[in-house]
Amino acid sequence: MERIATGGAPAAIGPYSQGMAHGEFVFTAGQLGLDPATGRLVDGGAAAEFERAVANIAAILETAGSGLDHVLKLTLYLTDLADFEAVNQSAARLFKEPFPARATVQVCRLPKDARVEIDVIAARSS
């Protein structure tokens, strides 16, 4: 197993790694829409948080020798399913065909009172 760490994503706020790689796969920790420079949630609602969280995921994947185009599975956690369509529109812009498999779950609360959290499983680039 290989620990993945980058300054391009927020530092872990608990006893976990930003990402782990094993063989040809990369597993990321859940990422919020936190600006890695300030540690604060970005303004602009769920879609903006999702886009920042994807940028954080992209930085972790790049460090691991992968990228957004290698994401196999994305899990999306929303505190309000009413944000689903706005987040979906952002996802359609940030991910390309073939889109990753995805699960969406409504949760009652996320760390730092975020509206969105995502984690992914990706293949390493060849």
Image (cartoon, helix red, strand yellow):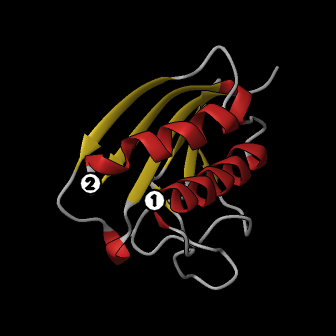
Q: Is residue 53 above or below residue 67?
A: below
Between 53 and 119, the one lying in front of the other is 53
- The residue type indicated by label 1 comes to Ala
Say which element carries label 2: loop
Q: Are marks 1 and 2 in contact (CB under 8 Å)?
A: yes
Q: Which residue is mark 2?
A: 80
Q: Is residue 80 above or below residue 32?
A: above
Looking at the image, the residue that sits furthest to the right is: 126
Looking at the image, the residue that sits furthest to the left is: 108
Tag shown at residue 25: none
Please name the residue shown 52% across and 62% down the image.
49
Q: Residue 52, how many percent across, how many down?
A: 62, 60
Q: Residue 93, how many percent across, how many down?
A: 68, 36
- The residue type indicated by label 2 comes to Asp
Please name the residue shown 65% across and 74% down the image.
36
Q: Considering the image in quadrants, where does the C terminus appear?
A: top right
